[in-house]
Amino acid sequence: MSAAEPDGKADGVANNHERTRTGSSVDTLRRAILDNLFYVQGRFPEVATPNDWYLALAYTVRDRMLHRWIDTAQTYKRTQARTACYLSAEFLMGPHLGVNLINLEIWDNVKKALAELGLDLLELLDQEPEPGLGNGGLGRLAACFMDSLATLEMPAIGYGIRYEFGIFDQRIEDGWQVEVTDKWLLHGNPWELARPKLTFDIPFGGSTEGYTDEHGQQRVCWTPERVVRGIAYDTPVMGYGVDTVNLLRLWKAEAPESFDFAAFNAGDYYGAVDKKIMSENLSKVLYPNDEGHAGKRLRLEQQYFMVSCALRDMIRIHLKSGSGLDSFHEKYACQLNDTHPALAILELFRLLIDDHRVETSLAWEIVRGTFSYTNHTLLPEALEKWPVSLFGGVLPRHLELLYEVNELFLDEVRIKYRAHDEGRIAKLSLIEENGGSLVRMANLACVGSHTINGVAQLHTELLRTTVLKDFHDLWPAKFTNVTNGVSPRRFLRLANPWLSQLIGGAIGCDWVRDLEQLKSLEQYVDDRGFLDDWRKARRQAKLRLAKLIKARNGVTLDPDSLFDAQVKRIHEYKRQHLNLLHIVSLYNRLKDDPSSDMVPRTFIFGGKAAPSYRLAKLIIKAINAVADVINRDPDIDGRLRVVFLPNFNVSNAQYIYPAADLSEQISLAGKEASGTGNMKFMMNGALTIGTLDGANIEIRDAVGEENFFLFGLDASQVGQMRHAGYEPTRVLAHDDELRAALELLDSGLFAHGERGLFSDLTANLRHADPYLVLADFAAYRERQQAVGECWRDPACWTRMSVANVANTGRFSSDRAVHEYAERVWKISAKPVGK
Ligand code: NBG
């Protein structure tokens, strides 16, 4: 049957071999999997392990992407398409296999083909190690944007680092977080293609010297102290239901020569390999965030390595097309994903002036025409700054250029205001003089970009009025907002097969590429049959999560209890401890009055703490300790369950979002830039309990206040309260339940009798409470009470759940990418072959 089978679109060749690599019928897929098992893995079915089969399948899927990839590249080349380059130190892609099966629309056929081979697709999906090349929201956003760019058929390249070790694996031992290295490359990575010939030698350190060129021009020559070679590794990123496959190009660091032969010959074997090791260190490991980067030379070197490789690659492509560098900014729109790649501004300037001899003012014009900058945080401690001495040691030429740019920029400021205002100049300067001098990366990003954006309306507003106020005063038109979005392919279509199927049956499947279509689900909010099916579909997802938690935590969950979930990085501003205090107070209530009527709840936590963030790690310990006691207490009788699912990552996120009834988005107002987990929960039909922070505000606007559990201070009230002098002890004095909860945490009950184990946490709340946990506690408790009441009316709850999904359209990353494309990048779709 296979020979007559109409295969994939570009598969025009009537040749058996070709068909095996491109066709998508069940029979062809089965043959292809076997072929890859033989010829790529060198295995045969009788001895193949699940991992062998996974790899055979992955290659089968990759084969189906490759010709589309080449067609896409040819289309872009032929049309000389303007291209968005997403520069990011993090791409938290998550497992590729599932989403590629969805995007290629071959899920069902692959499933059948595997069944014929006696294999289970879900089992093979589980084999894939997660490429965790990111910390959290910022890295995952980059991945969702890559997905949307491809789906919208927009020319784009993602540039980043191929870390050998991504974000650490989190184990929980005795309730504590333990970090373990993540060996995602251990069994090979079928999704990437190494490009050993595509390399750049990146200079570091050394010194600079002026000289006069043959035309009498003053120039500068940088003589580096060492060179590291960047090698390209390409990962195809498939669009949904289209032929577009875009490129994610990650750089691996190597030594230009594996051995220093002089040292080797002199008998210094270790010295000879030393250099190689030092070079390779550059792409060895992803830095966990919240680490305080100042002084971390390796981190600075990583950033430079990445942007220099990326820019040299862009220049290479541009020159190859026959264009001159004066049109570089017409060819490329480069997005700086936070300040991590902001060195690209100086590096492009340097490459243009020093290496390509572009005249300085034209070079600066090109630079400013090229870059745009997204800010992802308002936390002052997260804004990157580098000691000038470190900066100059690693990048001597860039420091000179930084001073040059700064001088020109500060003159621009003086001229604009017709004054020399010391205060203003000090705030805007690229250098902070505060004890030691520091290079301010956010300021550099603002000065070198044509557009600056925040990631939710409130966040952008706060950027305009606080963190970047002086830049906004100077260039109001540079600022814009693009609220984040998430990929409906991964986080609904793939993650939640049951709900996807139900939705598909009701309104068809076009929502996968046009999420606004979910709006028409509103016609079903009073349809009892539909609501029943909705509950059943959601229950399936809860059962799946319960199974995972049983396996990982050994805790049995009641799928009919209210699943109340908070999954995200552990951080004081996100206030997992507010949630925890509420749980402890519920526990107290049930112990005081075992007959009290409370809806059964399962509290699910997940998230990693930065390895050096002590208080965050203590919060993890506290959650686990409380879970341990509550889950064992016979008085509670399963009415409360608390679990901390270890190692929150994209893979298990796909189990959690679909299973949650309630989404906890309880950060202190004004702190969470946007949040994207909030969107993923909503998209799957969870209701939100949340503050007026980040994108919660827009979620509430979209779904209507009656479908959202709002509580707490808003950003301006937070400011006022601080201004008036906030005293947590005063709150405590008036709230017996809250006091009792804190006291119970201190009592030793949750610490095998060890009093004081949590005192750093509780004392911090009692005496400082920098994130106003206590101030918001009463409002939170009250809203949680309302959540419980609402849960008692399943029809009402389900209606609200449907309403949430129906109004989720705006939170697709497709919408966000459209906005960037139109307002920031000025790129448009280039469908393959057209
Ligand atoms: C995070 C913010 C989130 C936001 C994501 C994506 C970093 C540094 N910032 O609120 O905390 O949703 O970025 O924009 O990861």
Image: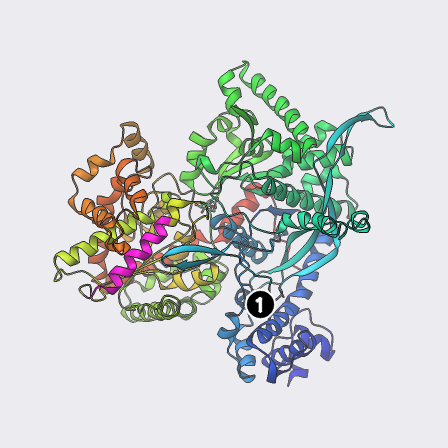
Disc 1 within 8 angstroms of ligand 1 (CB): no
* Horizontal and vertical percent position of residue 464: 45, 32
Which residue shows up at 41% across the image and 56% down it?
680
The amino acid at mark 1 is: Leu
* Horizontal and vertical percent position of residue 231: 70, 52
Q: How is the image coloured?
A: rainbow
Which residue shows up at 81% across the image and 48% down it?
266
Q: Residue furthest right?
A: 214
Question: Closer to the camera, 529 or 479?
Answer: 479
Q: Residues within 10 Å of mark 1 (few under 14, many from 20)?
A: some
Magenta segment: does it hold 631? yes
Image position of 26 (left or right of 355): left
Q: Which quarter of the rendered picture does the N terminus lie within? A: bottom right
Image position of 544 (left or right of 595): right
* Horizontal and vertical percent position of residue 23: 64, 75
Q: Is residue 313 visible?
A: yes
Magenta segment: does it hold 168? no
On screen, residue 728 above or below 263: above
Which residue shows up at 63% across the image and 22% down it?
407
The residue stretch that appears in magenta? 618-634
Image position of 273 (left or right of 133): right
On screen, residue 254 above or below 798: above
Q: Which quarter of the rendered picture does the C terminus lie within? A: bottom right
Q: Which residue is mark 1?
A: 104
Image position of 334 (left or right of 810): right
Q: Secondary structure at mark 1?
A: helix
Question: Closer to the camera, 181 or 315?
Answer: 181
